[in-house]
Image (spheres, rainbow, N blue to C red):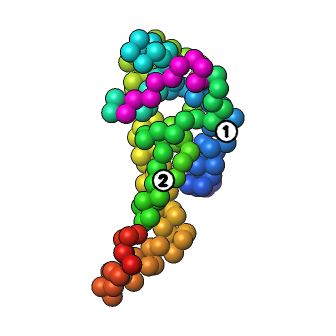
Amino acid sequence: MNTVETKFKGVEEILEGIENQAKAGSCKTCQFCVPAPNKYYGTTHCCAIQGNVNPIHFKEADLNGSAYPWKCDEGDWHDSDTWEQIYGCLAYQFKTQGVDDSDNSALCELAENHRKFMDCLGKAAHIHFAIKGKKLDEMLRRLNTGDFSRYWPWDK
């Protein structure tokens, strides 16, 4: 009997792939940069991933002048121990065939699914780097000894 073994990509491989995609493109070439004329801001596009809380609006000059994706709340993530921001747009995805910018329901569904992907990737990355960096061992030591000195980054 033959068994099929599935080879999954690791966290670092997935992150590197997204970063390489983003470096090869720009917000202008991202699936989630959609036409959204806004007279108030004087802009022509917005990021469908960033959402409504801190929306990112782009002028045509912004899109033509920026090679690497802009920093955004939704695309960035942070290290759970140091709270240091780790930049790099996890939201970046090349425009795909078959998804029309004007089809709002399809784009919303695609963006929602991608937000879930980014959340899952961020959580997986935290776990991965905690184990790789011996952070898990340190956390278990603290839990077992009750030693929480210098636990927060601002503790001295």
Viewer-closest of 94 and 62:
62
Q: Are marks 2 and 1 in contact (CB under 8 Å)?
A: no
Q: Is residue 112 visible?
A: no
Q: Quadrant of the C terminus?
A: bottom left
In this rendering, the answer to whether 43 lies above or below 32 is above
Which residue is the extreme one toward the bottom? 145
Viewer-closest of 43 and 4:
43
Q: Amino acid at mark 2?
A: Gln
Residue at the disc numbered 1: 23
Q: Is residue 80 visible?
A: yes
Badge 2 or badge 1: first in the primary sequence: 1
Give residue 85's mark: 2
Crowd around label 2: few <14 · some 14–19 · many ≥20 (10 Å) = few
Q: Amino acid at mark 1?
A: Lys
Q: Quadrant of the N terminus?
A: bottom right
Q: From the top left corner, tell me how far across and down residue 23 is, in percent.
A: 67, 38
| Circle 2 or circle 1, nearest the eye | 2
Mark pair 2, 1: CA separation: 19 Å
User: Magenta part of the protein: which range?
Assistant: 54-63
Judge left or right: residue 34 versus residue 27: left
Crowd around label 1: few <14 · some 14–19 · many ≥20 (10 Å) = some
Element at label 2: strand
Tell whether position 15 is magenta: no
Q: From the top left corner, tell me how far across and down residue 45 is, in percent.
A: 49, 19
Q: From the top left corner, tell me how far across and down residue 39 is, in percent.
A: 41, 11
Judge left or right: residue 71 versus residue 81: right
Residue beneath the point at 44% across and 73% down: 136
Give the quarter of the image for residue 78: bottom left
Element at label 1: helix
